[in-house]
Amino acid sequence: MRGLAKFVGIAGVFMALGLFAILTVGAGGNSAKALFEARCSMCHDTDRPLGQTKTVDGWRETVTRMQEHAGGKISDEDTEIIIQYLGEIRGK
């Protein structure tokens, strides 16, 4: 039982580190916030999405739609980082 608890603890640390990496490092070493600001402000003010609260699935739908409108200026990797970032700071 002790081994299982140790494994779960270690797995939790790695999961937390992975989430931290997603939320803090984007393409080119940018923070998730900086990436969000850079990509989303290409088309609109960032207050627009920051004034909303959505589930991660809701953010996925919105950010994916915005990615399509941006005409290839937002990579799939950046899209996923932005979705996770918005889910973390503006999620339901």
Image: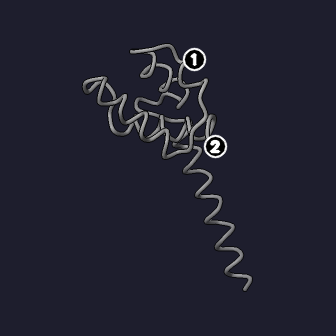
Residue 56, disc: none
Front-most of residues 7 and 63: 63
- Residue assigned mark 1: 47
Look at the image and tell me in which quarter the N terminus lies. Answer: bottom right
Is 44 left or right of 76, judged from the image as shown? right
- Residue 31 image position (x, y, % from top left): 53, 29
Q: Secondary structure at mark 1?
A: helix
Give neighbour class at mark 2: few <14, some 14-19, many 20+ (Cα, 10 Å): few
Q: What SS does tag 2 mark?
A: loop
Instruction: Classify 40 as above or below 18.
Output: above
> Looking at the picture, which amino acid does disc 1 mark?
Asp
Q: Nearer the viewer, residue 10 or 60?
A: 60
The residue under the point 49% across, 27% down is 30
Q: Are marks 1 and 2 in contact (CB under 8 Å)?
A: no
Report the side of 16 relative to 30 (left or right): right
Residue 56 horizontal side relative to residue 75, left or right: right
In the image, what residue occupies the spot 30% across and 25% down? Answer: 69
The image position of residue 73, as x and y in percent, is 30, 24
Q: Position of residue 39 (x, y in %)?
A: 42, 22
Is 85 on the left-hand or right-hand side of 67?
Answer: right
Residue at far left of view:
71
* Image height of 69 relative to 41, above or below: below
- Residue placed furthest toward the right: 2
At 52% across and 31% down in the image, what residue appears? 32
Q: CA distance from mark 1 to mark 2?
A: 18 Å
Q: Which residue is mark 2?
A: 92
Q: Which amino acid, by three-letter code, is at mark 2?
A: Lys
